[in-house]
Image (cartoon, helix red, strand yellow):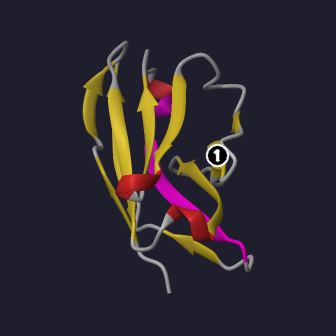
C-alpha cells in the first residue's frame, strides 16, 4: 500500500504561482512513474505532468512552459511548480504513483483556484 499526501493548493490570482507537493509513503526508487492530474468541474481527469524514475518528464500541451514537475528522492516528494497560472487551470489536482508492479495509487486531491 502507498499513501500520497498532496499540499500547496489554494487561491491565487491569474499570473501568480503555486507549488504543489506530494509526499509518498515509500521510497521513490520503488515507483516507476509519478504524475500530476487535474479534474475541473464537469470535465474528465487529465494528465498535467509526469516524471519517470529516470527523470524523463512529459507535459500536457496546455501547461508546457508554465509548469515544471520534479522529484526529490531523499524526501520521497514530487513537486509541481505552476507559474503564470490562468483561470482555466482551476481544478482539483491529484498526485498519482505507478509502481514497478504496475499498481496504481492516487492522493486525495487538492483544490487549486485561479481568479481572473
Q: Is residue 75 left or right of residue 53?
A: left
- Span shown in magenta: 89-100
The reply to whether the magenta stretch includes residue 54 is no
Element at label 1: strand
Residue 43, compared with residue 84, is above or below; it is: below
Q: Quadrant of the C terminus?
A: top left
Residue 32, compared with residue 89, is above or below; it is: below
Q: Is residue 113 left or right of residue 50?
A: left
Q: Looking at this rendering, what residue extends furthest in the bottom direction?
A: 1
Crowd class of label 1 (few under 14; some 14 to 19; many from 20; radius 10 Å): many
- Percent across and percent down for residue 106 are 52, 69
Residue at image position (68%, 80%) is 103
Instruction: Report the residue marked by disc 1.
Output: 51
In this orientation, which residue lies closer to the viewer: 77 or 38? 77
Residue at image position (60%, 52%) is 35
- Percent across and percent down for residue 25 are 39, 73
Residue at image position (36%, 16%) is 14
Splitting the image into 4 quarters, where does residue 45 fall? Answer: bottom right
Splitting the image into 4 quarters, where does residue 50 fall? Answer: top right
The reply to whether the magenta stretch includes residue 92 is yes
**Total numbered labels:** 1
| Main secondary-structure element of the magenta-colored stretch | strand
In this orientation, which residue lies closer to the viewer: 89 or 76? 76
Q: Is residue 25 left or right of residue 59?
A: left
In this orientation, which residue lies closer to the viewer: 95 or 72? 72
In this orientation, which residue lies closer to the viewer: 70 or 19? 70
Q: Is residue 59 left or right of residue 28?
A: right
- Percent across and percent down for residue 10 are 25, 40
- Percent across and percent down for residue 75 are 35, 55
Amino acid at each position: 500500500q502507498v499513501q500520497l499526501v498532496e499540499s500547496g493548493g489554494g487561491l491565487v490570482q491569474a499570473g501568480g504561482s503555486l507549488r504543489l507537493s506530494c509526499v509518498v509513503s515509500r521510497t521513490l526508487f520503488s515507483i516507476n512513474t509519478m504524475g500530476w492530474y487535474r479534474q475541473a468541474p464537469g470535465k474528465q481527469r487529465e494528465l498535467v505532468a509526469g516524471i519517470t524514475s529516470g527523470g524523463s518528464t512529459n507535459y500536457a500541451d496546455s501547461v508546457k512552459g508554465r509548469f515544471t514537475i520534479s522529484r526529490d528522492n531523499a524526501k520521497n516528494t514530487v513537486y509541481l511548480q505552476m507559474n503564470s497560472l490562468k483561470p482555466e487551470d482551476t481544478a482539483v489536482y491529484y498526485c498519482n504513483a505507478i509502481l514497478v508492479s504496475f499498481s496504481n495509487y492516487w492522493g486525495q486531491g487538492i483544490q487549486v483556484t485561479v481568479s481572473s
